[in-house]
Image (cartoon, helix red, strand yellow):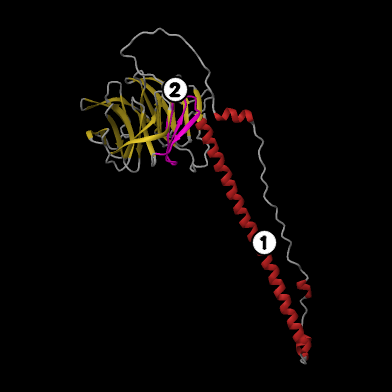
Amino acid sequence: MSKQGEQWHREIDIVVNKMKTEISEMKVKHRDLLKKHLDEIKQTQALIKHTLLAIEELKKSTEVSPTIEYSSNIREFSKLPPKLKVTLPTFIPKPLDHEKLYNLFGQITPLSTATEENVLSLNQPNTSVKTLLDEPELVATIQTGYEKVTNVTYLNEDCVWTSGFTKDIKCFNMKGALLHTVKIKSEQRPSDIAVDSDGNLLFSDGKSRTVNKVKNGQTEELIRLQGWVPGKLCVTSNGDLLVTMISGNDYQFKVVRYSGSTEKQTIQFDDEGKSLYSGNKNIKYIIENRNHDICVADYEAGAVVVVNQNGKLRWRFIGHPSVTKKNPFKPFGITTDSQSRILTADFHNHCIHILDQDGQFLRYIDNCDLEYPCGLCVDNNDNLFVSEIYNGNVKKIKFLR
């Protein structure tokens, strides 16, 4: 709570300083207007003095012709310069809504107690509560060799798979050593990669409209689409496969759940029959959260769209207001951690947004020199992997304690 308070103080200071800068700019503009008006008055005064001198010369002159030809400027000089009316800027403070501020600041989950049977289990997974680090730490940088790297997915404690703008899918260890390369037989690069529950590599091929599995070095076709083009992949906790896809003619978008090669569920419209997602060519990364929500990063819509496992809309996140993040929120990669937090890559602001499972913004990861973050994944120890599309790097970041 104290950290949140400090963050609010910093944000308020930024707003106040920005307004003070605006006032300073107004002062300069006001001064320039007054100076211009004064210069016009001085110019008129100079003309009057010059005319008076000319009249004195005429009075002293014995020449008749100049006197006859003289034309008075009194009418011209009687027109005073227009009066400069300036309305000074006024700060109008908005009334403070204390209840709204309280709700915006955050929420405190109620204290709850429960008893459970205390049974020793050697295979019990580690579900300890992990909190966010005050300052996320850059642990390692893997240089993939791709000119552009788009996707990263976790294999095991020591390895991640990556893919980019080539037909090669590469596996690296945490020291950045290349362990294995899969060359796909396709006319274009893979749209996405994933790892199934058995550790086999999956990849989508937009050109052939297929989703494929690499097992023991052999590639086998899992799914072939008609009229639709597969995009991003996500293997769910129960072993199902979520596939994003667009129609080949009018770019409608939907998410389809498969069990093996069998279609089980389609997610496309809300309860009012409106499309949940924007329809366009732009990629939309997908992930399943620990609570079985399905989270899609809709780049074109500038939103994270979350539905429950039945496909019902739960919430949308359209970015967090910030005076330091200048560009519109355009999410690319998306992943989740062991605490059901959602992490999404803010491509143009070079940072990561962390949300809770209900769409409340928690914090940024913006201190690890990220450049155009694209694909994301989290390993079993809650380390975050981020692919930086334009420099070919994958960064490993520790963000939980």
Q: Which corner quadrant holds the C terminus?
A: top left
Residue annotated with mark 1:
34
Q: Nearer the viewer, residue 200 or 262?
A: 200
Where's residue 31, x and y in %? 64, 59
Residue 203: quarter of image: top left
Q: Is residue 106 left or right of residue 291?
A: right
For badge 2, the amino acid type reads Asp
Mark 1 crowdedness (10 Å alpha carbons): few <14, some 14-19, many ≥20: some
The answer to which image quadrant residue 156 occupies is top left
Q: Nearer the viewer, residue 118 or 212?
A: 118
- What residue would you read off at disc 2? 293
Label 1, label 2: how many angstroms apart (C-alpha)?
62 Å
Residue flagged by tag 1: what amino acid is it? Answer: Leu
Magenta highlight range:
339-367
- Is residue 323 covered in magenta? no
**Residue 211 appears in view:** no
